[in-house]
Structures are given as C-alpha cells and as structure tokens.
Amino acid sequence: MADGAAPVLDVRGLKTVFRTRGGEVHAVNSVSFHLNPGELLGVVGESGSGKSVTMMSLIGLLPSPPADVRAGTVMLGDRDLLKISADELRDVRGAKVGFVFQDPMTSLNPVFTVGNQIMEPLIRHMGMNKKQAEVRAAELLALVGIPDAAARLKSYPHQFSGGMRQRVMIAIALACDPDVLIADEPTTALDVTIQAQILELVKDLRQKLGMAIVWITHDLGVIAGIADRVMVMYGGQVVEQAPVKELFANPQHPYTRALLKTIPSLTGEREARLQVIEGQPPILIGAPTACPFRARCAHAFARCEAENPERRAIDGRAVGQGHDVACHWTAEVAHA
Amino acid sequence: MLDQAPKSITPLVQVRGLKMYFPIYSGLLRRHTGDVKAVDGVSFDIMPGETLGLVGESGCGKSTVGRALLRLYEITAGNVVINGTDVATLAPEALRKARPQMQMVFQDPQASLNPRMTLADIIGEPLDEHTDLDSTQKLARIYELMDAVGLNRRFANRFPHEFSGGQRQRIGIARALALNPRFIVCDEPIAALDVSIQAQVVNLLEDLQEKLGLTYLFISHDLSMVRHIADRVAVMYLGRIAELSPRDALYARPLHPYAEALLSAVPEPDPTLARSRQRIILQGDVPSPANPPKGCNFCTRCPKVFDLCRQVKPELVEVEPGRMVACHLYPNTSVAGSTGVFEAKEHNQQGVSQ
C-alpha cells in the first residue's frame, strides 16, 4: 500500500443515472476512489447502495438506455475509460480488467465447455492459437485449484458444483493477466465452507500474482478477513473510507457504526437485543441535495437536510489516502 | 430424554426417526431407481417457548425438515408429534383441523405472497379458512395483527409489490400469527433481507415469542444470527443431525468435526481476529444425497476421519449432559452397525414409549 506508487485505477466524480418512468434515479453520485498496485479494496453496502453499478459503469457494462454515465473520469493507467471507443473498451474488458460476478451459474454459458470459455479471452486478447490457449487454460484451472485440470476442460458448467464454477469464473477473469480484478459479491451465493475455500484461494492468488482487486460485498465479516482498505457506500455515495483495521476499530459515519452494531457476533458477548437501523434505504429519484442517510440517522440535524456532505479527511491526510467520512455530524460535533 | 429440561415439561414438538426421501425415476419406463435421501433419520424435541435453531449448508435437508414437520410433504417414515398429535399419520380432515396450531414463515417474501391479493386479503385468508368471524370481527383481527407486526393500518388495501422486503416479511409473519399458532417454522426468514433490515425482523420475532409464548424452529444458514436467537442448535449435514447442543456450549466448544469446521468458516467482522484465527478449510464438496457415502455422511470431508467412520454410521447420542453428537470420536457413541431402516424403527419405539 505504498502511497508513492501511482494507482492502477483512479476514479473521480463518477455519476451514473438511470432514466425511468418515475424520474431519474441517481444510482451513483460523485463517487471517487483509487486502487493502488497489489491492493485489495473492499466495497461494502446494502442492496441499492450503488456498489455494483459503480463498478459496472467503469467498464461500460451497463445497458444504455436506461443507464447514463454522466460525469467523471476513470483512469486505468493513462487512459480514460469513459472517453475511449466501444472497441477499445472491449479490449480493456477481459485483457486489463477481469470481472467475477455473483452467480457463477448465470455468468457461465451452459452450452460451451469450460475450456472453451477460458480459451476465448486468450485467443481474442492474447493472440494465442488454439493449442497454446488450451495449454494455458489447463494451467489456469490448476492455478484456481481444480484437480485433473486438463481433463476438466472438456466439462460443461453444469458438471461443476457452485464453488467449482466460481473457481472457473476466477480462472476466466485471470486469463489475460489483468491489472485489476473486480469481484462483485463472488462468494454470496456460496455456502460458508465453500466461501472459506474461495477466500483462501484469493489470498493465495494475490501472493502469487500480486494483482489489484476490488471486492464488492455486503458481508463485513468477509471484508474484515481480506481487505486492505474499505469503502462504505450508502445511497449511491461513498460515506466512509479507511484502512480496514482503522474502519473496524474507529468507525466514524453513523451508518458504518450502526451497521457494525447490527451484526450479531459469533464469539463475543451475546446481546440481549439486536441494534437496528430503523427505516428503509432511500429512494434515489432526483439529484441529491441532502445527506442520503439523514432519515435513518440518530444524529441528523438541520444541516443534514440542507446540504449533502462532502468527504472530509479526519486524520489530516488527503481524502482517499487515510480515513475520510462524508458526514456533517462527524465534522461539526464529533471532531469539532 | 433429549433435553436437560425437567422431565415434567413435555416437549411441544417431538420428532422421531423422520425420513423424507424423494424418489428418482429414470429410464424409458420411469422405473423407481433410487431416492434422494433429503432427510435420513432425524430426531429432536422442542420445548414449549423454546427456539431450536436448525443450521447447515444448502442441500443438507434443513428446509425439508421444516416442511415435513408441518406435513407439507407426505413423509417417508417417522413420527412428528406436535402438541400431542402425531401429524405424520393424521387423516386429511383432521390434519386441516390441526393446521392452525402450526404455521410457517417462508424465506422469500416476494414469492410467498400472492401479488393479486391485498395485504388485508392475505392476512385474512387463514381466518376465512379456519374461523367463522363476521367481516367486522375479521377486520378488527387483521388490524390487531398489523399492529402486532408493526405495519401501519393505512396499508391494509395495498398490494405486496408496494412494500419493501422487510415489510413483506412482516406481512408473512402476520399471516402466520393469524390463527394463534403455538409453533412456527421460520424457514430462512431473513436470508433475503439486507443486514440493517434483518435485525428489525429478528427483534420482531423475539418480541412476538415473548408476548405470545411461541415456539420456533428457526432454520438458517447464518450461524451468527442463530447464536443470537436460538436456545439450542441442531447442526445438519447431508440429511442427518451431526450435533444438537445448547447454544452457548456449541459455540464455545463444538464437538462434532463438522460443527467445528462450519463455525470456523464463518467470517468474523474483526480484522485482527480474522487474520490471526486458524481456520479449518474443508476440502471438496458435499456428496449427493442420492448417493451418500457408506458409514458416516461426513467421512469424505472430515479432517479427523478414521477407519470405523467409513464402515459404520454413527448414531446421535448424548455424550455430555444435554449435548447430542453423532460421531465415532466420542467413545460412548454406540456402535450399533445398523442399517437406516433399523434405526428408524428404534426411534419409533422410543417415540412410542414416551
């Protein structure tokens, strides 16, 4: 996590809007973050918080219309992904940025063999011929821990279990040796013992390959175990960002604090009653003019209604480098 | 006895040797060629007012147990005595009469509510079926139920799609409560909800239990939530109970190797602990319930496996006060060397003798 090294991915002021009959839904609102080489950035949030839409906006995976990536820059190396052509973007996807989705059944094509699907990006992006691609595909399957890899290339997705399919997805995402791997809830559909296997695999692959990873999840337990840095999203915005230990030890945003308190512990003191966050997540129609969490926040005051808070560092470092939070209460009361 | 509770209290729910096989038909003549043994000889008691947690991974048969208990399936073998009546053998009309005392809350509130019925229709339907309240009384009861689960009375004429996931789950709970049941099977009631909404629903279930003296079977794969809500916990693996222990004992020191591995696989929301903790990573996947391994179900993945495990199926026996484990590692586990059928008979006799 060297501060000096240039980030592999640098996103500034990303805005994505969905046009619907009910109005414009501001799903991603001025999201900025960067990813350092070799780093694992955890993105936490509930459904509808904009975590998946943010990542899909980066690499043009959202259908337009209804989606409209309205503003921002997405620098991958020295190229702005929002400015390049559709063809160039297709080369970025797969070759430079690998993607692992939540549901390994629906993201693999059921009518092609697994080998075929791993070889496809190798042939397309790496200029390999079929023979070379097959050898590399077997290596990749072995790398993600599938026994008897060469023979399993001929299997179809339905012949694999859920955990095995997710390993195949990871193999495909890693095929072209990407700079960035984006994993969108990759273990949510899996059982805990299988999830533990996949988490071990990812830790192992990070050591071997050293790529930078964005890991989207709603599970704070998973984040605690693998992330270097965490970004908490709520209502389409980044509300808090900090190194993982700092975030869990010293959460600042009322939402982060409440979220950490609502999860029952497996080992600690057993609470008589669970803490709740009252109310419902916000509806994001119309451009935000107030703090998205104000209606559920125990500390909300007049300013939260009047003005959407900006991210502010609380440790004197630049926003995004240390610990920052977007909250009027934290700024005015807690750190007055 | 299965419990440490005083013997004067009779369990509200007694399950003995429950088996639920789903037949496999194959070939041109659709001959019966095998069975998916979803539940293969499960026995437990639930005391009045108690919450029994039932945990396990997908496909272990936990939901099938819940559904078989309410006889949503015709069960293959075993007894299910709820409040003194053996539900497993009741005739259809008698079963219908017995239904009000046992209800269910389903996992997916989207799929378990009829999209064309209003909230009042949904909550009122069990009242139409099982009571002869007139329309004023019925509406009063519907409002009472809506108040109990925290739904605004103004919503009575709205449709399910107008509600959020957490509110829909409240509708499902209100419907389950309509007939004053004593026993409710909660089948993954929070799995489809966001973390911040899960706590709201769990607190509601706990409040209702206290107020109405309900007994729950709480089926879940979320081990930390089960630790919060359950008094005792049964861990299932491939159709059988591996361990059944009081909550605190199980979480402090799991006895069955599968329970131990399962607990160690749960990610803890604490970065320091998560990095220092030694995890047990199980190899491989769960075998198919259509073709379970010989001997102990867990023998293909167990880190502590030895020869006996591959030969003889361990039975669920009490190895410490109140703690039942099915594992050969514990010396007083009986080595009956029995077939499944024989076991079921044994359980049946036990059930009858009580």
Image (cartoon, grey):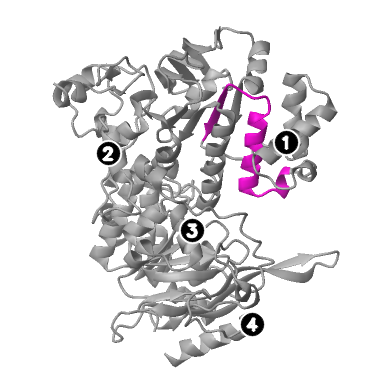
Disc 3 element: helix
**Residue B315 magenta:** no
| Residue B75 position (above or below residue B154) | below
Write down the region rendered in magenta: A157-184
Q: What is the spatial separation of the Cα atoms under label 1 and label 4, in whole angstroms?
A: 45 Å
Among the 4 quarters of the image, the one containing residue A100 = top right
Measured from the top left, where is residue A17 in percent x and y?
A: 46, 18
Measured from the top left, where is residue B54 in percent x and y?
A: 44, 64
Disc 1 element: helix
Q: Earlier in the sequence, mark 3 or mark 4?
A: 3
Question: Residue B339, labelled with which disc?
Answer: 4
Question: Residue B261, labelled with which disc?
Answer: 3
Q: Tell me the mark number nearer the camera, choosing from 3 and 1.
A: 1
Q: Chain ID for label 1?
A: A
**Residue A172 magenta:** yes
Residue at image x 41%, y 53%? B121
Do the residues indicated by labels 3 and 2 lie within the same chain of the protein? Answer: no
Q: What is the spatial separation of the Cα atoms under label 3 and label 4, in whole angstroms?
A: 27 Å
Disc 4 element: loop
Among the 4 quarters of the image, the one containing residue B354 = bottom left
Q: Earlier in the sequence, mark 2 or mark 1?
A: 1
Question: Residue A139, labelled with which disc?
Answer: 1
Q: Is residue B57 left or right of residue A175?
A: left
| Residue A336 position (above or below residue B123) | above
